[in-house]
Image: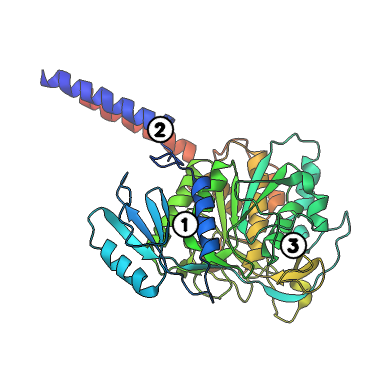
Amino acid sequence: MKSTVRKLLSVLLAALLFAMAVFPMSISAANSDGISAAQYLKQLNALIARYPCKNAEPPNRITVKTNSNHSLSDTQGAVASVEGYNNWHVLQFETVAQTTAAVAYYKTKSYVQNVMQSNVAKLVSPIKVGVGEEWKEGEPLSWGTAKVGIDKLLTALADKDLPETIVAILDTGLDYKHPYIKSHADRIVRGANNSSRDGNGHGTHCAGIVLENSPPNVKVASYQVLNDWGSGEWLPVVAAIYTAVDDGADVVSMSMGGYNDYSDIYTLFVDAVNYANNNDCTVVVSSGNDFMNASDFLPAAVEEAVTVSASNKDNTLALFSNYGDVVDIAAPGGSASYSDQSDGINSSVPFNCIESQGTYYDRWQGTSMACPFVAAAAATLKSMRPAYAPADIQATLKQTSLRPAGWNTEEGGDGVLLVSAFENLPETPTEKTTSGVDRSQWDIWTWICYIFFFGWIWM
């Protein structure tokens, strides 16, 4: 009898392991009440617009994480609230005293997992090094295009019928009336939180880089999560990741950052990036411009994302670029000298925005510029090799990068982006992963071990 039970249990366990391998779990993008990430983001943005940040100080707003399926009926006198997506509830108060008292109150409740005050997120402010050059059709916007080798790859892909691939840019918006953006109007798609304006210029600058450094099948969707001054709040940023993924984005590009000093926010980002990866979407983020360890910043510290440092024309790490083990790869975005205007990345900016220097094109430098180069590369790779999962794309970007003499892989990532190396990649990701292990062989040996193990039990 015991032998029969043991055999039955071993068969059931084997079946479970097989199902987990063949049908991996994915997280639902809607909570038990059926609210989607897009609906949640829309409500959050409406609340933030009504009660905006003042002087970049955290507003009288808190976020409460409750146990699964627990509604938050006791709002402690909040003047406005947004019911919880993934059990995150946002409450708005009128005074600092009310906010502080509410935080203390919810920390005592058994149904509350954690509670935190809203914190301000900021874009990775670029360094403006000079007025840009007007774009001439058929000519590159910046030196970075030739540096990463996209022209050579685009020539090889000219007769290929590639599937549509979408890059979601989470930033300050997008100026649809900009001459360069209008010239690529067939490559602009609208997401749930799509903005047709950009009062800062940062989002439009990043969009220009993506459009120039990818084939025509790569589209851009803009999600405005930062205001005209380049600041916002973390929770709407995180919610926008879910929204972009649900909208069908293949790549999410985020040139923004803040200090990694809130474990709850770090967990939010990890969960969001994992959700993206589980739904076949690669997240690309900038490392930051503070010449500090990137692990001290969010979202750069999230290992599941592709973290990008900035390199310059000489293929050395930019003076301002953040660095460290969490960095995956470098891309054009920097200058060997703050005073050398020619090293800035020329791209599109709205004429009358805050960051404009009086033209439709400006030269900026920063990891903010490097990030969209890699986002464009990730989207191009995905369209060329649809079977590649986000982990495969992350590994391939690193493996195909150029490693100049003297390059420190512990600071700037595995090397400098080189998309011209994509041309001869295998159709399926059967080569090395980031750990240097042949994944296909690992899978084979795993199943051999399963067979021997359960065979031994059966005996």
- Above/below status of 382 relative to 109: above
Residue 44 screen position, x and y as percent? 50, 55
- Above/below status of 420 relative to 24: below
Residue 78 screen position, x and y as percent? 38, 62
Camera-side residue of 14 and 196 = 196
From mark 1 to mark 2, how far is it between C-alphas?
23 Å
Query: Of the residues shown, which amino acid type is indicated by label 2?
Result: Ala
**Which corner quadrant holds the C terminus?**
top left
From mark 2 to mark 3, how far is it between C-alphas?
41 Å
Residue 270 screen position, x and y as percent? 43, 54
Q: Earlier in the sequence, mark 1 or mark 2?
A: 2
Instruction: Categorize mark 2 by other alpha carbons within 10 Å: few (<14), some (14-19), many (20+).
Output: few
From mark 1 to mark 3, how far is it between C-alphas?
26 Å
Picture quadrant of residue 254: bottom right
Query: Of the residues shown, which amino acid type is indicated by label 1?
Result: Glu
Q: Decide if residue 174 is on the left or right side of residue 239.
A: right
User: At x 57% / y 55%, what residue is drawn?
Assistant: 284
Instruction: Categorize mark 3 by other alpha carbons within 10 Å: few (<14), some (14-19), many (20+).
Output: many
Q: In this rendering, does residue 201 appear at all? A: yes
Q: Which of marks 2 and 3 is nearer the N terminus?
A: 2
- Label 2: which secondary element: helix
The residue positioned farthest toward the bottom in the image shown: 339
Q: Mark 1 points at which residue?
A: 303
Picture quadrant of residue 403: bottom right
Q: Residue 272 carries which label?
A: none
Q: Which mark is residue 21?
A: 2
Residue 392 screen position, x and y as percent? 54, 44
Q: Mark 3 points at which residue?
A: 144
Q: In this rendering, does residue 455 appear at all? A: no
Query: Of the residues shown, which amino acid type is indicated by label 3?
Result: Gly
